[in-house]
Amino acid sequence: MERTKARGQDRVDIGSWLMGRLGLPQLTSTPARSLKAPPSALDEKLTARLRRIVGDDHVSDAPEARLAVAEGRLPDLGRWLGAPPPLPDLVVHPGSPVEVAEILALAYEANIGLSLFGTASGAPGLRAQRPGRGQSGLIALSTARLDALKSLDPEGGLAVVEAGIGFAALAASLSGLRLKGATGRLSGALLRGTV
């Protein structure tokens, strides 16, 4: 058996040994393919209006940003398949409930689909999302900037939080109070995904 060093320990390369023992050729992985994102279908006027609402730095039509929300926590899936999943036309990161309301109103007015995107801790992102019938595009509305603990009532056991706060961040900011159901497996999840 072939031995390899890993983290200072001798380890047996079981896969190579088994393949040799069975007389099978070594397996190789399928190479990842580079993905090409189609251009955004939304016009520049709409994009400019969104930029005025949330600021230039919080609207992106970059292929990397669009692919990141489309793939969720499965970033290699599209690369292995060789085709990108359905992509939003823009990724928008509002910073307040007022900005969310303005984005919703604009999307309704322009007949643009919206899909909420959090941390993708356990969800496949927008992989199955496409604009609805008759809609001219899709916007991924990220809650990443909406991550504040607004108020805490220790006596009443009530915390008012924004939609994008992470479970771990909330648990850490509770000033010694315990968040019921807190487990390590939820550390990357949003609170709204756990209730």
Image (cartoon, grey):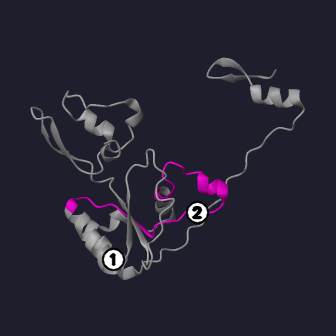
Q: Quadrant of residue 36?
A: bottom right
Going by the image, does 9 lie left or right of 52? right
- Magenta-colored span: 69-97
Q: Residue at x 31, y 72 (%)?
A: 50
| Sequence order check, earlier mark of 1 and 2 | 1
The outermost residue toward the left is 155
Q: Which residue is labeled 2 in the image?
A: 84
Going by the image, does 94 lie left or right of 129? left
Measured as percent of width and height from the top left, residue 160 is found at 17, 45
Q: Nearer the viewer, residue 195 or 139?
A: 195
Measured as percent of width and height from the top left, residue 86 is found at 53, 65
Q: Which residue is labeled 1 in the image?
A: 48
Element under disc 1: helix
Q: Is residue 94 magenta?
A: yes
Measured as percent of width and height from the top left, residue 194 is found at 34, 42
Element under disc 2: loop
What is the CA distance from the residue labelled 1 to the residue labelled 2? 26 Å
Q: Is residue 108 magenta?
A: no
Q: Nearer the viewer, residue 194 or 159?
A: 194
**Quadrant where the N terminus lies?**
top right
Q: How many marks?
A: 2
